[in-house]
């Protein structure tokens, strides 16, 4: 059967090529200076006069294990709580989470590095202007085009090999600069690796390799492009607009292909993270209430869960909008390959980083998976708050054989703070789910809080249903078409419509069996819905 029975009709209804497919956009912001966040973009502005409410626990009863960011006590009038004017919390800062923007940085990401590092920016701009093509695409082009593109990419790669090995010492003073440096360098890395002819070894020159490994080591990131670089830090907003920006005001800074399709792909993820910030905060408040609340607790938890549900439903709508913003075959054949990592080479070649031994090791060094939205911290946070995984027992997420569970592995691609947050949240002994179960025992399974919990889980399950529609449309469908076209070419016939229905196993990032994996996570979500004997 196809990947997602019941969703296929939906996929087919929307599978037409969108109007803007393949349109080029200008991708690189060209401000001359390092941008300090404009005043109107200062997220701390609105909270400056609000007293800090850190470290307050009722009756000074500190739990032995403290939930992440649990130090902020909810405002007394919780019905009207304004998430964007509540006190900032040191606990939140430790995790690089903002009450306004969630996992998206609370400031407009830096645009430029100081001029000492302009060689990296010039190399990025040269790659964008040369419209570099993937080696695998170039090799399939006709002879004239192939020679032209080969010469173009070789010229660019030669300029990278000649580029100086710049010291990162003075970047160490600022995390924002290190993040931008890494974004530039991972962009150059992927441009370099994916334009090398498919028969040649992939050797990353010192000019990219050494500073990339150094910045990655400091930030404790794998030396490869991640969701954190490309989806949490690759956006811009109007300089004098309000902050946080509306999701419709976000712009994408850098793309590999210069297409609106790619920009919309990255922005869809950024929009989901930004909008998801409110769900994150509501879940936090629900957890605080579950742990410290009084007799009004169930009503408050119900309210927070219901409001979080509305946000999760909106996230699903944002996700589905991508059907009209991106062309499936363009995504699969021309955009996605740029994002794949050092363990995704079809010929099994490894990325060899020059100067690796000089930099030394850190835990993320060998992680070279391609960029995957499975690195999204908001979805894993919602899972953790709602106790999705623990509903079936830890570690039961589907995995490629012999490896750590895939979603666990994807956490090592997240920012250190986000990783710590998820790890503490997952380890926290009191959960919203157990609280709801306790209330159900006391007040009956038809109580409002049980219903609110279940509709929140259902909203997350619906999001995953829609995600399967998207994966079917943008990965499984195009993968089949590529395979059928290749088979038909070999057999000397045209691919038939019947062949399109064949369901071969498509592999996901890191070798997961895509459909099995996604179905497993979706079932696990559905399993978290609380049911009682008499239901
Ligand atoms: C065209 C759009 C998208 C495509 C083609 C796509 C594709 C995929 C694929 C192939 C996987 C399996 C893991 C892998 O191979 O990397 C995956 C997993 C995942 N994706 Fe997407 N995705 C898209 C959009 C999104 C969006 C907008 C989100 C929202 C944040 C998202 C969140 C996730 C999550 C959380 C997982 C892990 C499985 C889960 O927890 O359900 N994806 N995606």
Image (cartoon, rainbow, N blue to C red):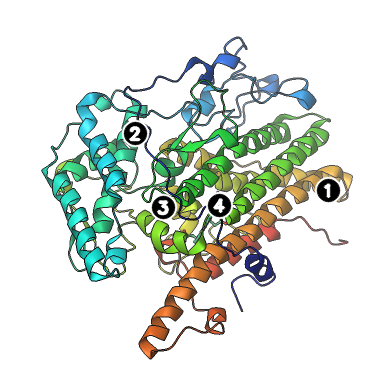
- Identify the residue position indicated by label 3 in the image: 371
Res. 180 mark: 2
| Gap between marks 2 and 3 measured at Cα | 17 Å
- Identify the residue position indicated by label 1 in the image: 441
| Gap between marks 1 and 3 measured at Cα | 43 Å
Image location of residue 195, percent across then percent down? 25, 57
Between label 1 and label 3, give the one nearer the viewer.
Answer: 3
Q: What element carries label 4?
A: loop
Question: Considering depth in this image, is 156 or 42 the residue closer to the camera?
Answer: 156
* Sequence-wise first label, 2 or 4: 2
Residue at 86 percent across and 51 percent down: it is 445
Residue 262 is left or right of residue 299, and the answer is left
Label 4 with label 1: CB-CB less than 8 Å? no
- Identify the residue position indicated by label 4 in the image: 325
Image location of residue 129, percent across then percent down? 29, 44
Confirm or reject: label 1 Cβ below 8 Å from ligand 1: no
Label 1 with label 3: CB-CB less than 8 Å? no
Label 2 with label 4: CB-CB less than 8 Å? no
Residue 532 sits above or below residue 447 on the image: below
Quarter of the image with the C terminus in it = bottom right
How many callouts does the rendering have?
A: 4
| Gap between marks 4 and 1 measured at Cα | 47 Å
Quarter-of-image position of residue 275: top right
Between label 4 and label 1, give the one nearer the viewer.
Answer: 4
Q: Is mark 2 on a helix, strand or loop?
A: helix
């Amino acid at each position: 059967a196809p990947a997602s029975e019941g969703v296929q009709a939906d996929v087919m209804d929307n599978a037409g090529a969108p109007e803007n497919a393949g349109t080029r956009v200008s991708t690189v912001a060209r401000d001359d200076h390092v941008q300090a966040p404009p005043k109107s973009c200062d997220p701390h502005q609105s909270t400056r006069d609000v007293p800090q409410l850190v470290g307050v626990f009722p009756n000074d009863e500190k739990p032995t294990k403290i939930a992440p960011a649990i130090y902020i006590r909810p405002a007394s009038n919780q019905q009207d709580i304004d998430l964007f004017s509540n006190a900032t919390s040191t606990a939140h800062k430790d995790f690089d989470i903002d009450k306004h923007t969630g996992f998206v940085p609370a400031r407009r990401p830096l645009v430029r590095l100081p001029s000492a590092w302009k060689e990296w920016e010039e190399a990025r701009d040269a790659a964008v202007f040369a419209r570099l093509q993937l080696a695998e695409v170039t090799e399939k082009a006709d002879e004239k085009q192939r020679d032209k593109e080969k010469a173009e990419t070789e010229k660019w790669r030669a300029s990278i090999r000649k580029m100086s090995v710049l010291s990162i010492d003075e970047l160490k003073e600022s995390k924002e600069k290190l993040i931008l440096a890494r974004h530039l360098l991972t962009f150059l890395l992927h441009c370099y690796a994916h334009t090398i002819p498919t028969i040649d070894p992939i050797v990353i020159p010192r000019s990219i390799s050494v500073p990339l490994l150094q910045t990655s080591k400091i930030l404790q990131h794998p030396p490869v492009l991640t969701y954190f670089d490309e989806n949490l830090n690759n956006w811009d907003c109007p300089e004098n607009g309000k902050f946080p920006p509306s999701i419709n005001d976000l712009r994408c800074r850098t793309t590999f292909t210069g297409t609106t399709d790619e920009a919309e792909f990255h922005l869809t993820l950024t929009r989901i993270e930004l909008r998801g910030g409110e769900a994150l905060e509501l879940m936090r408040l629900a957890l605080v209430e579950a742990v410290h609340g009084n007799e009004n607790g169930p009503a408050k938890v119900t309210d927070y869960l219901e409001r979080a549900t509305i946000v999760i439903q909106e996230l699903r709508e944002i996700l589905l909008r991508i059907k009209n913003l991106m062309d499936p075959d363009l995504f699969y054949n021309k955009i996605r390959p740029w994002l794949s990592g050092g363990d995704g080479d079809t010929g099994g070649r490894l990325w060899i980083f020059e100067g690796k031994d000089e930099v030394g090791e850190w835990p993320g060094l060998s992680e070279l998976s391609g960029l995957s939205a499975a690195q999204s911290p908001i979805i894993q946070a919602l899972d953790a708050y709602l106790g999705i995984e623990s509903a079936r027992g830890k570690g039961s997420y589907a995995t490629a054989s012999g490896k750590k569970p895939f979603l666990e592995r994807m956490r090592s691609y997240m920012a250190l703070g986000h990783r710590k947050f998820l790890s503490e949240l997952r380890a926290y002994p009191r959960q919203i789910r157990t609280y709801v179960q306790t209330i159900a025992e006391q007040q009956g399974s038809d109580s409002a809080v049980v219903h609110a919990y279940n509709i929140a889980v259902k909203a997350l399950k619906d999001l995953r249903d829609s995600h399967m529609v998207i994966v079917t449309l943008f990965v499984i469908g195009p993968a089949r078409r590529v395979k059928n076209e290749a088979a038909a070419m070999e057999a000397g016939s045209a691919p038939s419509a019947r062949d399109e229905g064949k369901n071969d196993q498509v592999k996901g990032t890191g070798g997961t069996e895509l459909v099995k994996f996604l179905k497993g996570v979706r079932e696990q979500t559905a399993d978290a819905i609380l049911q009682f004997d008499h239901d």
